[in-house]
Image (cartoon, rainbow, N blue to C red):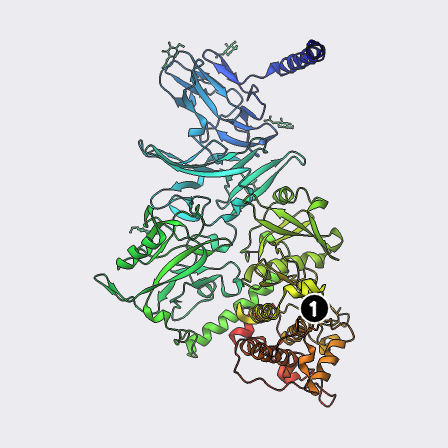
Amino acid sequence: MTATRQLLVHLLLPLLLICFLLLSIQTSAAGGFTDKLEWGQNLTDGQTLVSPGGSYTLGFFSPGASTKRYLGIWFSVSNTTVYWVANRDQPLPDKSGMLVFNDVDSLVLLDGSGRTAWSSNFPAASAAAVWLLESGNLVVRNGSSDISLWQSFDEPSDTLLPGMKLGKNLWTGGEWQLTAWSSPDDPSPGNYRRTLETAGLPELVVWQRGVKKYRTGPWNGRYFSGVPEVSWYANKYTLWVTKSPSEMTYGYTAAPGTSLTRVVLNYTAGGVERLVWDAGTGEWVSYFKGPRDPCDAYASCGPFGLCDAGAASSGFCGCVEGFSSVVSASPSAQEVRDSADGCRRNAALDCDGGKTTDDFKVVPGVKLPDTQNASVDMGVELEECRERCFADCSCLAYAAADIRGGGDGTGCVIWKDAILDLRFVDGGQNLYLRLSKSEFDDSKGFPTLLVATPIASAFTILLVLFVVWWRRKRRVVGVIPHNPAMAVPSISLAIIKDITINFSDGNMIGQGGFSVVYKGKLPGGRTVAVKRLKQSALTTKGKTDFVREVEVMAGLRHGSLVRLLAYCNEGKERILIYEYMQNKSLNAYIFGAAKLRASLNWEKRLKLLHGIAHGIAYLHGGSGESVIHRDLKPGNILLDDEWNPKIADFGTAKLFAAIDQAGPDQTIVISPGYAAPEYARGGEMTLKCDVYSFGIILLETLSGERNGALHRLLSHAWGLWEENRIVELLDTTMVPLPESETELLSELKRCIQIGLLCVQETPGDRPAMSAVVSMLMSTTSHIDWPRRQVDSREAVDSNSSRGLRTDLLSSTTTDLT
Ligand SMILES: *[C@@H]1O[C@H](CO)[C@@H](O)[C@H](O)[C@H]1NC(C)=O
Ligand SMILES: *[C@@H]1O[C@H](CO)[C@@H](O)[C@H](O)[C@H]1NC(C)=O
Ligand SMILES: *[C@@H]1O[C@H](CO)[C@@H](O)[C@H](O)[C@H]1NC(C)=O
Ligand SMILES: *[C@@H]1O[C@H](CO)[C@@H](O)[C@H](O)[C@H]1NC(C)=O
Ligand SMILES: *[C@@H]1O[C@H](CO)[C@@H](O)[C@H](O)[C@H]1NC(C)=O
């Protein structure tokens, strides 16, 4: 016992001494700095206050090219990053300024002639002194009292630091807000302000003078409804909104040990940015930047408009269901571009004295509309919210106010005014919209929109011209941040490094020719797949392909396609983040060991094929765009935890390869065994090539055999088909189907027949994907007799493939004509 104690004393004492010595050296080295200015002292130009931990510095500076002097506080690591300025609109002409306490109880900034350029008022206190705290807050206190008499955090400039707040003081009516600088050379209050609006649900709004420019969407308990991506770094920087009798405010906290951060309102266009200091590179890294795209511009689609950042081809704007866009009689090119006129209801509501036949339709995945005039009740469930809206004829829509509990959420927001500033966001909320009973009548056709009146045709032509112009313009653009068509958030490299533990080998889950795939874990616990392009793939073309993949994926949303959640385009990094699929890809099962094959029984296989067919049909036109996948194969069909298929790999380096080239050096991008014969011969890539690949996938899934480059499976299948023994194609390693299962058996036979239709030699003979879907879904509809082509006909029937050939750049034109 005593021995240990002696040992401790011998070891610890010298250690403690060393520590003490080091500390005293540090203190004396820092002797020139102080964090405090007391009554009777003064601070002149050239002198500074430094916060105790050294993070922040107060002093005099000249912004940008200006020679005028201002008193401000900046980040010590980056002395041009000034986050607070005292004399914003009263610059000092020279270096004769001085900060001092005066006799009438305030801290004042005096110029050379003793005139006051800035002052802070606080209650009289004889022992007042001002401290620069390690939080960045400059506070006046009375002696050692903890109560601050005045603090800079109450008078924000253009920057919000952790511990600061925006919002309203409900007692005094005072407000905390950010005001942008006028220019990089002039910190005086500029045109942009950012406030926390509290009339409906709290939401952050950027104003340009008196006009709303950009809102984040209402606070839903976890984030602002239009900015779900903040949850990506919620473990580091956590947002909060509080309401108390005295105030309603927003702010954020930084977890201990995290890097310096700030949220700044920019003088250019009122952009809002969250920046995080990267000590490694000595630069600020952007974690979030808004507005992100044209859809973030306030109310850009007018009342009842719905903005879709992925729908650049239609000028981003559409209407919510049950409404059609208001097209003025003689549309100018400008009007075609933005249908800011808004939308008009197709069928009047029917509600009188509480009696109504109306119903609600859900508008999923949106930033909730402006709640300025909405009424809010946090205390009810969503079901009651619905009833309230139903019973009130002036209620147009409702939504949950709080999503913290999961599910559909709780609380109630009710809109009686126009629905304004609605847009799709990834991870957005549901809005329930009141519509006339007739909108629920399935037999009703689409509203007659572009009927062939002269006006409508003129409109169509203008729209087509605009789209062509716009797309041509857009083709040149190779850098994502300049591209407006982004529905998918861009995430900083720092965050991605964080969630993949710096791309550690332990997190690697796959590797291809062009990319490495990692597993990543988001703060909320969700797992994602992180696809990082290899540097060798970063040719000019590789970069263009990356931009295109993001563009395409941003516009696609379907249960049978993997979802792109975010991307990163920083320096030399090109990274895509997808939802993570638990169960690997289809090939692992259908070609796997008996046990794996057995885990996919016949019902599951049929269901899978239906799902894949739906996904491809959606790609081929269901989204409004026509996209050719070009590399469909079982290895690109992922399975989620409920065995739903998810089509993946929109081939960063493959998808669009054929678009830019025109010469004979066209490389065949599709895997052998899945390529349509006309394409393999050097022909054109059409939608029917995807149909062919689907046919092969179908046959492989049911037979458990690979087709391979020699098309062995296909010859086998055609042989059996012609001999009327097609049942023998079914995977023999599976438990044989009992005779009693006639229904299942005939369904499998139908399915094979459809598969054979898809792999017919002549593209024109193959059904369109939408026809494949309806054949698969019906057990009664007629199915053509598939024929194996003998070389009697011209292999490529040019007539039948006309109008089907499509690629991204011409698809919309095809749709409209
Ligand atoms: C400012 O402080 C210095 C010493 O700290 C003192 O010599 C000087 O007179 C002060 N100036 C004024 C104007 O109070
Ligand atoms: C900021 O830092 C640079 C270089 O470190 C230095 O030259 C400059 O004088 C500093 N400016 C201020 C206002 O401290
Ligand atoms: C400030 O502190 C002094 C002594 O420390 C005390 O006499 C005085 O009353 C205090 N004033 C206020 C306003 O708290
Ligand atoms: C405002 O944006 C411009 C251009 O993006 C940038 O150079 C500048 O540093 C930003 N200013 C602030 C205060 O963040
Ligand atoms: C709320 O009502 C006011 C007054 O009628 C109106 O000016 C404003 O545009 C409305 N705001 C929204 C978002 O509907």
Q: Residues within 10 Å of mark 1 (few under 14, many from 20)?
A: some
- Pick the front one: 46 or 672: 672
Label 1 CB sits under 8 Å from any ligand 4 atom: no
User: Residue 534 location, x and y as percent?
Assistant: 73, 52
Position of residue 25 relative to residue 427, above or below, is above
Task: Answer left or right for 210 relative to 80.
Answer: left
User: Residue 96 location, x and y as percent?
Assistant: 51, 19
Give SS at disc 1.
helix
User: Residue 235 location, x and y as percent?
Assistant: 55, 39
- Pick the front one: 381 or 435: 381
- Pick the front one: 45 or 256: 256
Residue at image coords 23%, 61%: 354
Amino acid type, mark 1: Ala
Q: Quadrant of ligand 3?
A: top left
> In which quadrant of the rendered image does the N terminus lie?
top right
Task: Answer left or right for 668 relative to 395.
Answer: right
Position of residue 356 relative to residue 788, above or below, is above
Q: Which residue is mark 1?
A: 658
User: Residue 265 location, x and y as percent?
Assistant: 49, 40
Residue at image coords 70%, 87%: 722
Residue at image coords 47%, 31%: 163
Whether residue 575 is visible to the viewer of this picture, yes or no, is yes
Total numbered badges shown on the rendered structure:
1
Whether residue 682 is visible to the viewer of this picture, yes or no, is no
Q: Residue furthest left?
A: 353
Position of residue 374 relative to residue 393, above or below, is above
